[in-house]
Image (cartoon, rainbow, N blue to C red):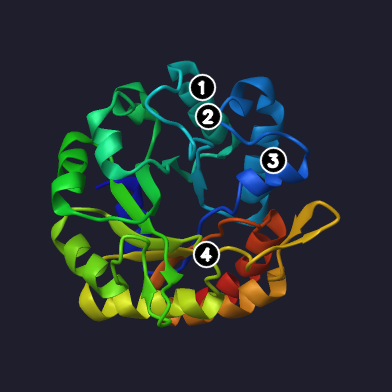
């Protein structure tokens, strides 16, 4: 049994970490993957802050890697996340590339899967069995997929490829993935994220997770300011759990303070 399955078997909400990219930007550092080599102490410190806040699932700083990224950049990212983990945390490789590009390129051969507990394809807009199956069959670790949504001109929740949450969940049920999630999203609110989870659950019985943004940012004095406070995210967490999510984390604009607030909400739910 994988460490992920063992964690899920307890049936209690699990916290994932929050944003890495916006935390690096707040520190005045370019968040592209090279930062794992140029500022490793900062990347590790951000990971550690999420562990201290209560996150049990950590994502490597590899979201922006591509098939041309050097192997040592990826290895450093995995080592930094694993170094911050105290032993019980799960470490997943985060990748934002489209599924077809991931499998067709050389990225998978450069991932040190022996040091990973899972592989997360996130911020995806398309989901087809023909694209995901080669990845799930090839990898020895659980594969998670997280989709990103927007509202179309008529107000319907869909991806930029026109896929609804229900259509995605129906495909995911057959695709052999370990978990299905939702993250990021243009102008997608916490309430929208809850609706997406409910739509997923109406169609499939896969374990679900959610990593919403801290709202839609506005620019203030050349800085992006995200409106959702830690307290608001913590108040939303029970709604996400009732909608079917077993793992909760954060995407753009979320901070260790958001995860710490969710830990307090988690403690109440686990009692």
Q: For this rendering, which residue is in front, 156 or 53?
A: 156
Kindly report which numbered mark, 4 or 1, lies closer to the viewer in this rendering: 4
- Asked if the residue at tag 2 contacts the one at tag 1, i.e. Cβ–Cβ closer than 8 Å, the answer is yes
Residue 271 makes an appearance in the image: no
Q: CA distance from mark 1 to mark 3?
A: 16 Å
Of the two numbered discs 3 and 2 on the same chain, state the one appearing first in sequence: 3
Q: CA distance from mark 2 to mark 4?
A: 27 Å
Q: Residues within 10 Å of mark 4 (few under 14, many from 20)?
A: few
Q: CA distance from mark 1 to mark 2?
A: 6 Å
Asked whether the viewer can see residue 157, the reply is yes
Instruction: Give above or below for 260 relative to 198.
Output: above
Residue named by callout 3: 24
**Residue in the picture at 26% in, 81% down:** 202
Q: What is the quadrant of residue 54 in the picture?
A: bottom right
Give the mark, 1 or 3, whose residue is nearer the N terminus: 3
Query: Which residue in the protein does label 1 denote?
Result: 73
Which secondary structure, mark 2? helix
In front: 119, or 168? 168
**In the shown orientation, is residue 262 left or right of residue 175?**
right
Which residue has dot 2 on it? 77
Asked if the residue under mark 2 is in contact with the one under mark 3, i.e. CB atoms within 8 Å, the reply is no
Q: Which residue is mark 4?
A: 186
């Amino acid at each position: 049994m994988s460490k992920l399955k063992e964690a899920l078997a307890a049936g209690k909400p699990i916290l994932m970490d929050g944003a890495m990219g916006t935390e690096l930007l707040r520190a005045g550092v370019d968040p592209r993957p090279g930062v794992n080599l140029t500022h490793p102490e900062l990347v590790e410190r951000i990971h550690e802050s999420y562990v201290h806040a209560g996150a049990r699932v950590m994502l490597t700083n590899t979201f922006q890697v591509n098939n041309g990224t050097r192997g040592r950049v990826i290895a450093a990212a995995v080592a930094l996340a694993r170094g911050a983990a105290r032993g019980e945390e799960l470490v997943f490789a985060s990748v934002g590339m489209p599924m077809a590009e991931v499998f067709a390129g050389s990225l998978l051969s450069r991932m040190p899967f022996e040091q990973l507990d899972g592989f997360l394809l996130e911020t995806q807009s398309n989901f087809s069995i023909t694209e995901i199956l080669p990845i799930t069959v090839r990898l020895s670790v659980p594969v998670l997929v997280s989709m990103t949504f927007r509202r179309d001109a008529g107000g319907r929740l869909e991806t930029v490829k026109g896929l609804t949450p229900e259509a995605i969940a129906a495909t995911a049920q057959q695709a052999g993935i370990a978990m299905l999630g939702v993250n990021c999203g243009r102008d997608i609110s916490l309430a929208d994220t809850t609706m997406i989870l409910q739509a997923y659950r109406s169609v499939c019985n896969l374990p679900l997770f959610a990593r919403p943004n801290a709202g839609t940012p506005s620019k203030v004095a050349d800085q992006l300011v995200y409106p959702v406070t830690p307290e608001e995210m913590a108040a939303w967490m029970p709604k996400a759990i009732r909608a079917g999510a077993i793992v909760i984390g954060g995407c753009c604009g979320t901070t260790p303070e958001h995860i710490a607030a969710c830990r307090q909400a988690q403690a109440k739910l686990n009692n």
